Image (cartoon, rainbow, N blue to C red):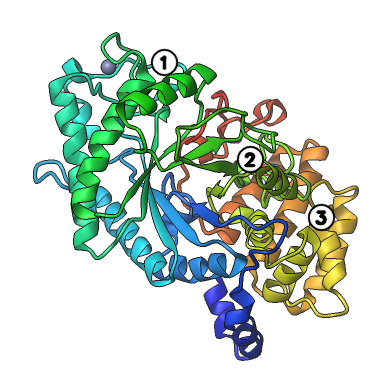
Amino acid sequence: MNQQKAACNPILLPLVLLLSAPWAFAQNPKSENFLPARELYAPAHFGNAYEVMSADEMSAYLAEVKWMGFNSYSDWFTATDVNDPYSPQHADEKSRSRFEKKKAIYLAAQEAGLALNVIICPNHVYVNQLADKEIAATKGRLIQGQLICPSTPRGREIILANHRNWFADTAKAGITFNTVTAFAYDYGGCACDQCSPWILTSAQLTKEIHEIAKEYHPQIEPWYCSWWWSGEDHQLFNEWAASEAPGWLKGMTMHIEYNQTRPKNVAVPEGCRKLAFVHIGYGERGGYATYGKMGPVFGPKRIPATIAELKNLGFDGFQAYSEGRFDDVNKMVLAGLASGTQPNADTALEAYARRYLRATETDATRWTELLKQCVDPVSPTESRKELDSLAKKVPGNWRIEQWRSRLFLVEHERAKNAERFLDAQDKLYRDVYGLGKVDHVLNPAVGRPGWIRRTNGKPDSQKEMLPEQ
Ligand SMILES: [Zn+2]
């Protein structure tokens, strides 16, 4: 199921030890693709792989992520669907266990030598904190989730207390955050008159939260992610930063929209690093296959093009937004290129195939061609024959099985065979990824194409594809 098991295999051990040697991790700052800041943002939520895997499995997976070339890790302080774990009245087992596990994974990442960032959506609060309608936020198109209004005294008090609890508890556990990254929209925002313009209310609130964070993590730097920001938001924020908080913001993770390979060309406050929010949960183009609903995703052109754009635009690096292990190949290519350990996508794929698929000198090229072919297979049947032939010597490997599942799903999709498609999807989720109940935008019923809705006897959903956090 995981790489740790593969690494314990005595046949593989010499190979693993060889590849784990320090030189195998060495970055190459002279590479034309080199970017110093390479973060994996892997929120453990909604029933995704990061939430489902044990802390030990995550620890083993983070070691692989580091080998691929990432040097920083982040999770999100997720209040979604749970009560306040720090409230004696409202804490429940689900909320407590969620945050205990997040702490365990952060500690594992810290021990692995990864820098630590924490994502916050400041006015997104616990379920039990929504009862008081007097402090409810006003929602809007880009403003959703469990929100309260920070312009009400009681609302602001709750928001600040939530962050104090979280920063104090993580510091007590021995975790040292390097950065905190705030989001203004999606799970966040309030469209009431007192909060308008929202971007400035968000900025001031985040600045107060950063002061609290510094009490427990003295060196913590404030970053923002511009996910869903408008041009006007950027302008207002920059004016605020220049007059009210010069030099305060240290990093801006610029949102790259779907199917684009570069962020909008907008200025950031003086002294602020430019980073990019790179969505690795889809392949060449967004759509229903986003988030692994049709198995693994890979953008053989999009990912290298994104690195090249960021390099040309003078960015320092990226936060790679990931919702599970289905984007494993995207991770390898993105981090391999940006760390300078891999000169191009083909060498990154070869390194991947050698480490995880037991590729040899003679079949490494066949593996890389197959992985590229599986993105949009001319013939899923022929690709599966090639996969079966190459995979004979790789028993019980989820990385292989996810590609096999993808080929079945593409075949059933083209034949419009809903029953077989849904059976294959269940097998992928349960047997390959080991997922249980998957919520929100990760639920495979969300955004299902119409040809599946028209069938009988299977679970259905009329929900539209939601924007994601
Ligand atoms: Zn408000």
Q: Position of residue 156 (x, y in %)?
A: 18, 27
What amino acid does circle 3 point to?
A: Lys
Q: Position of residue 115 (x, y in %)?
A: 42, 61
Q: Dot 1 corresponds to which residue? A: 140
**Most distant residue in the top direction:** 193
Q: Is residue 284 left or right of residue 53?
A: right
Q: Are marks 2 and 3 in contact (CB under 8 Å)?
A: no
Q: Quadrant of residue 363?
A: bottom right
Q: Is residue 92 visible?
A: no
Residue, x 55% and y 84% (percent of image)? 8
Q: Residues within 10 Å of mark 2 (few under 14, many from 20)?
A: many
The image shows residue 60, relative to residue 16, as above or below, that is above
Front one among 37 and 192: 37
Residue, x 45% and y 47% (percent of image)? 437
Q: Dot 2 corresponds to which residue? A: 290
Q: Earlier in the sequence, mark 1 or mark 2?
A: 1
What amino acid does circle 2 point to?
A: Thr
Ligand 1 falls in quadrant:
top left
